[in-house]
Amino acid sequence: MPDAHYIDPKLAALYDLGSGWSEDRDFYLSLAGSHRQEILDLGCGTGLLCHAYAEQGHRVTGVDPAPAMLNLARQKSDNPAIGWVEGSVQEFRSPKRYDLIIMTGHAFQVLLTDNDVRAGLDTMHRHLKPDGKVVFESRNPKIDWAGRWSARGIWKTPEGPVKAERRLVSFDGDIMTFDWHYQFTDDARVSRSELRFLSHERIAEFAEAAQLRVSSIVGDWSGAPFDADRSEEMIFELRLTE
């Protein structure tokens, strides 16, 4: 079940304010190149990347388990090059095969159990063309995320300012639990989330078991080499095992 800030329409409408276009999306957009490709966006959210890929001439399937997010995605345009699917990465199935499969916004970290990770990677393996690639990122667990997780801000909306605050609840093993507190002019809401922080070695082991090999790992959105002790990001490129 997706978190409340994805399924509650009032909270989903805030998503692009806190997670709008950024350097990570520039990175993912550049992966497609100039030749038309079939692209699968797992956990597409409000469809920012789906629409950008389609505008460049690619054909895109956007998959997300939250109908409120998909409703926002559909409202941005009716580009026929995009197909929207309500569903999870674990359960998505299609007869199509894709040149590029992405999972952005640290969505890989919402795969909280070993079985979830296995099922998600199996979906990627099933739908990848022989010469295609999978790209996703996860936060490096060597970084002190608990110490830097708290955050707050004020987002301007047509209905007035919204105060948003992120509060750490716990960090037990590799699972972080945290709350988003939202204060509207006439309402207050809380959404609880969980993320899993797997090591790059563990992710590589899961990928290998799914018959996917790690072809590269970079440590930031400029493509710098991954440093296991210092890089905040672990950006994986996977290809089918030969």
Image (tube, rainbow, N blue to C red):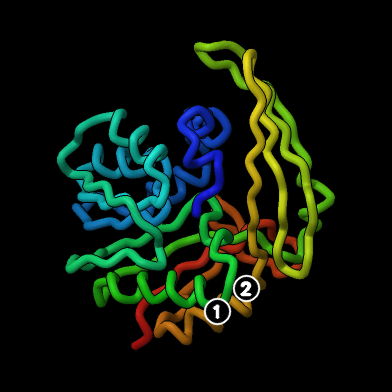
Residue 87's disc number: none
For the residues bearing labels 1 and 2, Cβ distance under 8 angstroms: yes
| Residue name at image x 25 percent, y 30 percent | 77
Q: Which residue carries the number 2 mark?
A: 200
* Towards the viewer: 158 or 200: 158
Question: Would residue 233 appear left or right of 66 to someone viewing this image?
Answer: right
| Residue name at image x 50 percent, y 41 percent | 6
Amino acid type assigned to the residue bearing label 1 in the image: Ala
Q: Which residue carries the number 1 mark?
A: 204
Residue 139, given in percent of the width and then of the height, sits at 64, 59
Residue 194, given in percent of the width and then of the height, sits at 65, 55
Amino acid type assigned to the residue bearing label 2 in the image: His
Q: SS of the residue at dot 1?
A: helix
Q: Residues within 10 Å of mark 1 (few under 14, many from 20)?
A: some
Residue 100, given in percent of the width and then of the height, sits at 32, 61
* Towards the viewer: 86 or 212: 86
| Residue name at image x 43 percent, y 74 percent | 119
| Residue name at image x 35 percent, y 40 percent | 70
